[in-house]
Image: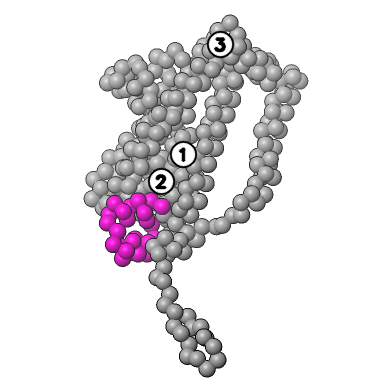
Amino acid sequence: MAESAGEGSAPVEVAERPASLHQYVSTYGYSAAGTATPVRRRGEGRGAWALLGFVVPVLLLALWTWLSTSGAVPSHRLPSPLGVWNAGIELAFGERPLLGGYIAISTQRVLIGFAVGSVIGLLLGALVGLSKWGGALLAPTIGGFRAVPSLAWVPLLILYLGINEDSKVTLIAIGALFPVYTTVAGALRHVDPHLVEVGRAYGLGRLSLLTRVQLPAVVPSIVSGLRLALAQSWLFLVAAELIASSTGLGFLLVDSQNNGRIDRLFLTIVLLAVLGKTTDALIGLLERVLLRRFG
């Protein structure tokens, strides 16, 4: 860069500072493919898009109300939204207020199983995605286990872990493990080689290269895997609570079916949807924090 000190004076050369590793790799957007990450202005149209997401639920609620009150569907097959609401009030504040405890124990099982499964999936995904030996040794076996249906694990878990919380949490952890493993392993295999070369040029070792370059490069893929794992955890919850459980939303679902309480059955389905979306929104907040830090 040349600057003139005055008339007739020779230009003075000012040395430019070399770009840091963070500045260099930021030109690649920290994406697994090495492409730039789109920049979105804070708050740009966020409120309008959030409100737009309520349109379909409101329309479904209106259709549900019309079908249940018009007689198009018999009440023993489709309870009204008001009937489902009253069933929830009865379970939450009646003579035996059970609903709060059921929600708490199911959420606890999901969060613990999700955390354990995600950590194991992240470690296995990193091992398979970064090491040719690890991929050759582990990928076929893990792929085989991934193909086993959730209910097939239930008898084995009862046999080895017994009828207790351990077997339920383990089944949920199995469900959460594979989405994280699959997304992380696949993303790490396709990290832009320029990022790795720059990290090595800066003298980073294997562990530093993983934590400072490769994992930040696949943050979007990791978050996608976590979201899939969380959804899978709620799916495996019902199967887990079939293991001789006497509490939880999965138990309430089966108990309502056996007793013909269709209103409670619909209540359980709605609660699972709301809880699943709420926890997914928490992962969305984590995604914003990670992208603000590494994006």
How many C-alpha atoms fall within 10 Å of the one at disc 1: few (<14), some, or many (≥20)? some
Which kind of residue does numbered mark 3 sit on? Answer: Pro
Foreground mark, 3 or 1, reads: 3
Instruction: Please determine whether, in this image, residue 261 is positioned above or below residue 208.
Output: above
Q: Is residue 193 magenta?
A: yes
What is the quadrant of residue 147 in the picture?
A: top left
Q: Which mark is residue 183?
A: 2
Q: Residue at x 34, y 16 (%)?
A: 163
Q: Are marks 1 and 2 in contact (CB under 8 Å)?
A: yes
Disc 2, SS: helix
Camera-nearest residue between 206 and 151: 206
What is the quadrant of residue 82 in the picture?
A: top right
Which span is picked out in magenta? 191-216
Circle 3 is placed at which residue position? 97
Q: Answer with mark 3 or mark 1, whichever residue precedes in sequence.
A: 3
Q: Residue at x 66, y 33 (%)?
A: 57
Compute the Cα span from label 3 to label 2: 41 Å
Q: Which mark is residue 228?
A: 1
> Residue at the right extreme?
70
> Residue at the bottom extreme?
8
Compute the Cα span from label 3 to label 1: 32 Å
Q: Position of residue 37 (x, y in %)?
A: 51, 57
Q: Answer with mark 1 or mark 2, whichever residue precedes in sequence.
A: 2
Q: Are marks 3 and 1 in contact (CB under 8 Å)?
A: no
Which kind of residue does numbered mark 2 sit on? Answer: Thr
Q: Is residue 27 left or right of residue 38?
A: left
Camera-nearest residue between 295 and 143: 295
